[in-house]
Amino acid sequence: VIAQKYLVSKPEMIAVVAGDQMKEVQLPDGSWVTLNRQAELVYPEKFKGRQRALNVSGEAFFKVVSDPSSPFVVDVDQKALVRVLGTSFNISPDDSGESISVQVVEGRVAFASAGGKDEVILEKDQQATLMGGTVKKDESVERNFLSWKTGKLVFENDLIGEVLKQLEMHYHVNIEPDESVPQELSFTSTMDNQELEDVLDEISLVLGLDYRYENEQVVFTLSE
């Protein structure tokens, strides 16, 4: 079980804030952290002791250098703890801060609530979510969880509501269908670092929709 002793202690800490752009940070042990927009990272100038401990707030992707003698421990906004030996994984809190998800790309991690009482072990291509102090392994991994880092979005017969939700998160813009758009519409496509306008045009063409900008948001309507 992950214990509270792994939380970061004080001296010689470095704070990094991503701001409006992604930011990559190399840690003292050679590990890399990619911070999504507005994410924050606090880590020691030099890792000391029996663990490599740091704090993160917001979404971040970690590629951790393996060191069996020194576990790598991430305190996520003082709500959850992630402990690994060497792996790559993504931490994604939701916008409200009510839930935190961890997706494992390579390796194996332990994901627990801050108290360390509720813990699951995750391996490659597995995901778990912390909500209300409880950690549960999800049945599947969100397909586009790394789109913020890679710029790539993949849709496979996804309903229009889910497609627009994914686009909202990726492009940081409000997108809504009005009442004329059938909820059962589905969309399949792969988008690789495309501009928002190109994506909106593709959805309009494929699904027979129109869109307009209204009150700082994009509104889709069924074509007449």
Image (spheres, rainbow, N blue to C red):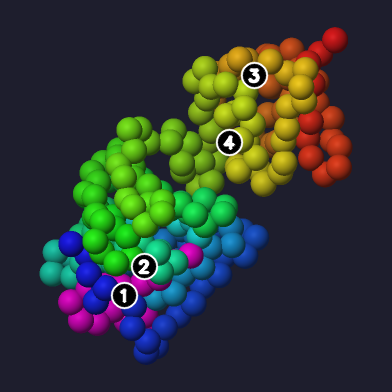
Q: Is residue 220 above or below residue 193?
A: above
Residue bearing mark 1? 7
Look at 48% across and 36% down and name the residue there. 144
Closer-to-camera residue (152/210): 210
Look at 29% across and 67% down and name the residue there. 115
User: Which type of secondary structure does the marked residue at label 4 adopt?
Assistant: helix
Q: Is residue 199 above or below residue 184?
A: below
Kind of residue sitting beneath label 1: Leu
> Residue 183's spot in the image, x, y percent?
64, 19
Q: Quadrant of residue 128?
A: top left
- Distance Cα–Cα, label 3 vs label 2: 39 Å
Kind of residue sitting beneath label 2: Asp
> Residue 164's spot in the image, x, y percent?
64, 31
Q: Earlier in the sequence, mark 2 or mark 4?
A: 2
> Residue 205's spot in the image, x, y percent?
73, 15
Magenta range is 44-57
> Residue 213's spot in the image, x, y percent?
84, 35
Q: Earlier in the sequence, mark 3 or mark 2?
A: 2
Kind of residue sitting beneath label 4: Gln
The tag on residue 100 is none
**Residue contact between numbered discs 1 and 2, judged by CB atoms under 8 Å:** yes
**Residue contact between numbered discs 2 and 4, judged by CB atoms under 8 Å:** no
Residue bearing mark 4? 166
Look at 37% across and 57% down and name the residue there. 133
Q: Residue furthest bottom?
A: 11
Residue bearing mark 3? 183
Q: Quadrant of the C terminus?
A: top right
Closer-to-camera residue (27/82): 82
